[in-house]
Image (cartoon, rainbow, N blue to C red):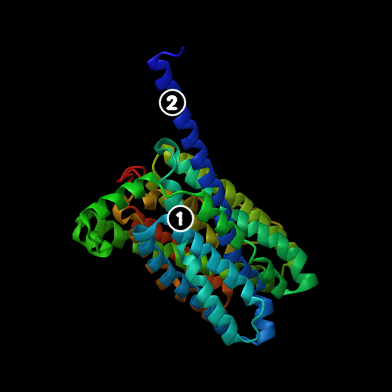
């Protein structure tokens, strides 16, 4: 017969195993959701040349489609962040994933610039809430491994890039750009899995119970701006996000066109270059997560932003046919580093009660303002070159790193309310 201490030890071990199994499930489903997110973002860049040709668009009009996407993402992300504090992280992530998956599939039926723009704007409302996947997973994973796990989680976006680049190499030449968008509706099945298989995090449930006990729904933005620390973090993360996302979306929208039009790389070879770049970014994100746990989330983010900023001019001015592959690989690693640590760094900047609103709000205000980046690069590409536009990308990456210097590490533990 087991003693009381043996029974308690057995129950503790069982609870630990259940908890570990649960966060692994949340991680796996969150990872798959970010694959869908990354695939959607990259798909537009890969199909841009064909959409331009079919609809007869100018560079500025093509950039405007990218910018409209960012505006929709910003609005959806701000609303989704607020909703995640009010009704739950899981519900918001599941509905957002379903919306942008079905919307992306509908793009295959668009036959004009206006139709494409309207559908893209509506579907992008869902993409904006995907930043909350990191918040959801952060509220499940153990504190001591959080940066590494969230760094690995962020590789889901790179995996999405790689998946859609590989699919495009097969689908685009034979079946056209519309088929690629039809296929992108498949993740709606993943949204159902998340909705029914993932419970809300314990920290959110505790925070929500406290709100219900008070019998009043708080004004989350009022809470943020009444608290000096939360207000400061919100403002700093808004500016850091404006700069980082301007670089991120400017680069992703125009990198395929830059390689194809200005470096004269054939599309069949272009996919190889891009897959290599994002595979190395994949490694950079894992390295950033590992280093963030052992050193500093802030330090890793700052070094990654500044490193990417300083290396872009090297690609623009010193590339040759012989060295471009190696330069792209090295840049891919640097590019992945800040993306690998931002999920942990940002989530730990806010208390659970306002985390969804603060992360979704600051990140997506940054997205909204970064919506000008694809248009600006399109304008620079028309007047000068895409390469010159990428120098602007380097400048904004640098500014994001400088802004993050003022954001402290590990202000809040995401497993506590």
Percent x, y of residue 265: 72, 67
Q: Is residue 242 visible?
A: yes
For residue 305, the mark is: none
Q: Nearer the viewer, residue 310 or 131?
A: 131
Which residue lies at the image location 45% right of the left edge and 52% below the top edge?
A: 134
277 in relation to 15, above or below:
below
Dot 2 falls on a residue whose secondary structure is helix
Q: Nearer the viewer, residue 57 or 414?
A: 414
Mark 1 = which residue? 90
Which residue lies at the image location 58% right of the left edge and 76% below the top edge?
A: 385
Which residue lies at the image location 66% right of the left edge and 71% below the top edge?
A: 181
- Which is closer to the viewer, label 1 or label 2? 2
Dot 1 falls on a residue whose secondary structure is helix
Q: Decide: few, some or many residues near mark 1? Use Cα within 10 Å; few <14, some 14-19, many ≥20.
A: many
Percent x, y of residue 334: 53, 52
Q: Quadrant of residue 41?
A: bottom right
17 in relation to 51, above or below:
above
Dots 1 and 2: beta carbons under 8 Å?
no
N-term-proximal mark, 1 vs 2? 2
Q: Nearer the viewer, residue 249 or 362?
A: 362
Which residue lies at the image location 65% right of the left edge and 57% below the top edge?
A: 162
73 in relation to 59, above or below:
above
Percent x, y of residue 102: 59, 70
Q: Quadrant of residue 106?
A: bottom right
Residues at marks 1 and 2, CA–CA distance in whole angstroms: 28 Å
Answer with left or right where residue 320 lies relative to residue 341. Answer: right
Mark 2 = which residue? 11
Percent x, y of residue 168: 71, 65
């Amino acid at each position: 017969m087991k003693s009381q201490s043996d029974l308690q030890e057995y129950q503790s071990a069982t609870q630990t195993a259940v908890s570990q199994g649960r966060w692994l499930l949340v991680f796996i489903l969150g990872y798959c959701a970010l694959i869908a997110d990354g695939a959607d973002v990259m798909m537009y860049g890969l199909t841009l040349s064909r959409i331009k040709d079919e609809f007869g668009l100018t560079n500025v009009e093509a950039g405007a489609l990218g910018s409209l996407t960012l505006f929709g993402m910003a609005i959806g992300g701000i609303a989704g962040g607020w909703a995640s504090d009010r009704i739950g992280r899981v519900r918001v992530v599941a509905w957002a994933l379903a919306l942008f998956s079905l919307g992306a599939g509908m793009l295959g039926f668009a036959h004009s610039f206006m139709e494409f723009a309207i559908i893209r704007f509506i579907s992008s409302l869902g993409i904006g809430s995907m930043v909350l996947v990191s918040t959801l997973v952060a509220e499940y994973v153990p504190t001591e491994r959080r940066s590494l796990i969230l760094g690995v989680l962020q590789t889901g976006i790179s995996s999405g890039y790689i998946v859609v680049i590989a699919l495009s190499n097969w689908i685009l030449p034979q079946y056209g750009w519309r088929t690629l968008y039809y296929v992108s509706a498949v993740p709606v099945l993943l949204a159902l899995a998340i909705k029914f298989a993932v419970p809300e995090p314990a920290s959110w449930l505790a925070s929500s119970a406290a709100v219900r006990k008070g019998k009043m729904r708080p004004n989350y933005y009022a809470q943020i701006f009444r608290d000096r620390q939360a207000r400061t973090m919100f403002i700093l993360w808004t500016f850091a996000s404006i700069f980082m996302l301007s670089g991120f979306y400017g680069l992703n929208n125009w990198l395929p066109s830059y390689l194809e039009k200005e470096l004269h790389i054939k599309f069949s070879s272009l996919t190889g270059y891009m897959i290599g770049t994002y595979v190395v970014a994949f490694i950079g994100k894992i390295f950033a997560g590992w280093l963030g746990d052992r050193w500093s989330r802030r330090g890793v983010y700052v070094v990654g932003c500044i490193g990417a900023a300083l290396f872009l001019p090297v690609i623009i001015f010193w590339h040759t046919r012989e060295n471009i592959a190696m330069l792209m690989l090295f840049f891919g690693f640097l590019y992945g580093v800040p993306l690998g640590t931002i999920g942990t760094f940002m989530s730990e900047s806010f208390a659970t009660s306002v985390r969804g609103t603060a992360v979704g709000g600051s990140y997506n205000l940054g997205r909204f303002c970064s919506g000008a980046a694809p248009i600006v690069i399109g304008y620079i590409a028309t007047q000068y070159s895409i390469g010159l536009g990428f120098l602007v990308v380097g400048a904004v990456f640098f500014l994001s790193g400088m802004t993050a210097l003022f954001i402290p590490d590990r202000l809040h533990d995401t497993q506590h309310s």
